[in-house]
Image (tube, rainbow, N blue to C red):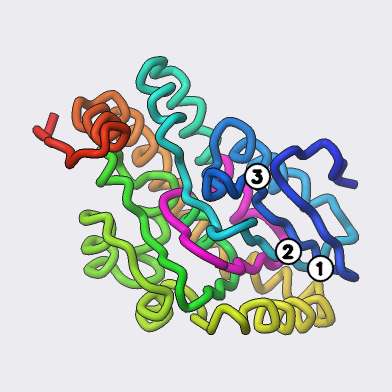
Amino acid sequence: MIDFDSYQKLLFRREDGILHVTFNRPEALNAFGDTLGPEVERFFREVPQDENTAVIVLTGAGKAFSAGGDIDGMQRMIDDPGLFHVASQRSRRLVMSMLDCPQPVIAKINGPATGLGASVALLCDLSYAASHAKIGDPHVKVGLVAADGGSLLWPQLVGFARAKEYLLTGDLLTAEDAARIGLINRSVPADALDATVDEMARRLAQGAGQAIRGTKASINIVLKQLAEAVMPAAIALEDLSAMSRDHAEAVASFREKRPPRFTGR
């Protein structure tokens, strides 16, 4: 059993076999940070043993699904580079544990999902977004390699050409465009999001659980093989980019509210 009370930044609500999990850091747009990030990673290590959970629904409190990283955290990692390696390894474990999670996971994307937040949403088995939500991986805009899932997931979902366009520019997509190109399952009006997700969650929870889990595991075999091939090198490249002048400049420019002046170093 999961000790739900031991979590500080995750909210839980159980409805029959459906476990609703909410990222609860709305003041920071549910950026993962020092507490929420480790808790999400721990949750996906623990939930496979929870026999009462047939389906998981992930969403964010407030206006965002998750903004991924936060600038204050990035500055702390610039000041102490060893912290970035710890965080990047945690991201790698999160990717693998989500791929290993036996229960089907549904992303209810209620607002912006960016960076690692987008990766978590796209690692879910099904993804539904409110039409006003935006989704993207802007790692390069802060001088970082898109390693914590972006370089693994996007080519598989939308093809290499589109993946490179969005990952090399860091541009965000509207939910409607994301659904149109196959990045997510569906974009729906905001007032229909809860009902859409609840209907699918109930359908899966009432389905043949062993068959559903086995089918998910079968589909994820190739993704797991790719992750084992891609993630170590991608994370190592991101660790290097975290020590670059461009990354420090991106963080400084954000804090100083000015355009960055990148030098390629």
Q: Mark 3 points at which residue?
A: 40
SS state under label 3 = helix
Q: Is residue 140 above or below residue 261?
A: below
Q: Quadrant of the C terminus?
A: top left
- Whether residue 106 can be seen here: yes
Picture residue at 83% right of the left edge, 60% below the top: 13
The numbered mark, 3 or 2, whose residue comes first in the sequence reads 3
Label 3: how many Cα within 10 Å (few below 14, some 14–19, many 20+): many
From which residue to which does the magenta span run?
93-116
Give, as a three-letter code, the residue at label 2: Ile
Q: Is residue 146 above or below residue 113?
A: above
Q: Mark 2 points at which residue?
A: 56
> Quadrant of the rendered structure where residue 63 is?
bottom right
Give, as a three-letter code, the residue at label 3: Val
Between 28 and 262, the one nearer to me in the picture: 28
> Contact, CB < 8 Å: mark 2 with mark 1?
yes
| Disc 3 to disc 2, C-alpha distance | 13 Å
> Contact, CB < 8 Å: mark 3 with mark 2?
no
Label 2: how many Cα within 10 Å (few below 14, some 14–19, many 20+): many
> Quadrant of the rendered structure where residue 235 is?
top left
Residue 18 image label: 1
Query: Horizontal placement of 265 versus 108: left or right?
Result: left
Indicate the position of residue 202 as horizontal and vertical percent values. 79, 80
| Disc 2 to disc 1, C-alpha distance | 6 Å
Between 116 and 150, the one nearer to me in the picture: 116
Indicate the position of residue 42 as horizontal and vertical percent values. 70, 40
| Disc 1 to disc 3, C-alpha distance | 17 Å
